[in-house]
Image: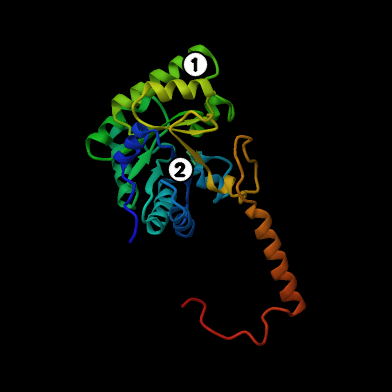
Amino acid sequence: MSEPRVRVPDLREKKRRGEKIAVLTAYDATMARLLDGAGVDVLLVGDSVGVVVLGYEHTLTVTLDEMLHHTRAVARGATRALVVADMPFMTYQVSVEEAVRNAGLLLQAGAAAVKVEGGPAIAGAVRRMVEVGIPVMGHLGLQPQSVHQLGGYKRQAMQREEIETLVEDAHALERAGVFAIVLEAVGHDAARQVTSAVSVPTIGIGAGPDCDGQVLVSHDMLGLFDGHIPSFVKQYAHLAEDVARAARAYADDVRAGRFPEAARPLETRRS
Ligand code: KIV
């Protein structure tokens, strides 16, 4: 019998019970099936897809059509995990109406919730999305869609005043109705203070051990991405090396006439 789906209210319940929440990014059906089967609670169709899958320099280039495409794929692969889709840059900042319409498209593509970056500036859009039945996850601290304004991917909320602002921003998102808040690359003190100040779960990435849950980019933690990996990432596998080794062995076999083997039975590509 299949396990019951993780739903939005389950995450707040996990925080209440002191149970940590495991979140990973996913961008396609096969990976979603594997991560879902391993018991990951939330699959985030992150706009990090732009960097680790599509080869863009940053997430600002990712379009709504691309997010819809990857969200559909992940939704087809996930049977238990809560699927959350990132709203790409400029799909929720221009007007509340656009934010609601675009979030609705992501839910129609199979997401159960959307994620947006920012604090009070986007609270109006968050409130309206929640009012019409769209669950929203917030994202504070390092906001990659603001990389140009920040001047790089820098650690946030290290000083007392910045921590106070972060806590205020988290309260603003909580009042607007978010069901969880990602805290990216903030000081550990800041993460601890926000986590105890809000009733919704915090999901940390490079924010220390005191958040209610953790998220990593799956391609980073699986060692599948061959670009820069942030130092806070724990790598549980080194798949890029495995892929390169397998591809080299295959190419060698083809060139040497070792593959295909004459004795191998012929069948169609997929049953
Ligand atoms: O896009 C993404 O993968 C994210 C996570 C890093 C939280 O927003």
Position of 254 relative to 226 (above/below): below
Give the residue number, with chain letter if any, for mark 1: 162
Tell me how the rendering is colored: rainbow
Give the distance between the C-alpha atoms of the residues marked 2 and 1, in whole angstroms: 26 Å
Residue drawn where x is 51% and y is 29% of the image: 142
In the rendered image, residue 78, in percent from the top left (x then y), is placed at 39, 55
Rate crowding at label 1 as few (under 14), some (14 to 19) or many (20 or more) other CA atoms within 10 Å: some
Rate crowding at label 2 as few (under 14), some (14 to 19) or many (20 or more) other CA atoms within 10 Å: many
The quadrant of the image that shows the N terminus is bottom left
Q: Is residue 86 left or right of residue 134?
A: right
Position of 261 relative to 141 (above/below): below
Q: Nearer the viewer, residue 231 or 104?
A: 231
In the rendered image, residue 34, in percent from the top left (x then y), is placed at 48, 57
Give the residue number, with chain letter if any, for mark 2: 23
Q: Is residue 13 left or right of residue 163?
A: left
Looking at the picture, which amino acid does disc 1 mark?
Glu
Could you say which disc has been placed on residue 200 in the image? none
Q: In this figure, what is the number of numbered marks?
A: 2
In the rendered image, residue 209, in percent from the top left (x then y), is placed at 52, 30
Looking at the picture, which amino acid does disc 2 mark?
Val
Q: Secondary structure at mark 2?
A: strand
Q: Nearer the viewer, residue 23 or 209?
A: 209
Q: Secondary structure at mark 1?
A: helix
Q: Nearer the viewer, residue 181 or 85?
A: 181
Position of 162 relative to 216 (above/below): above
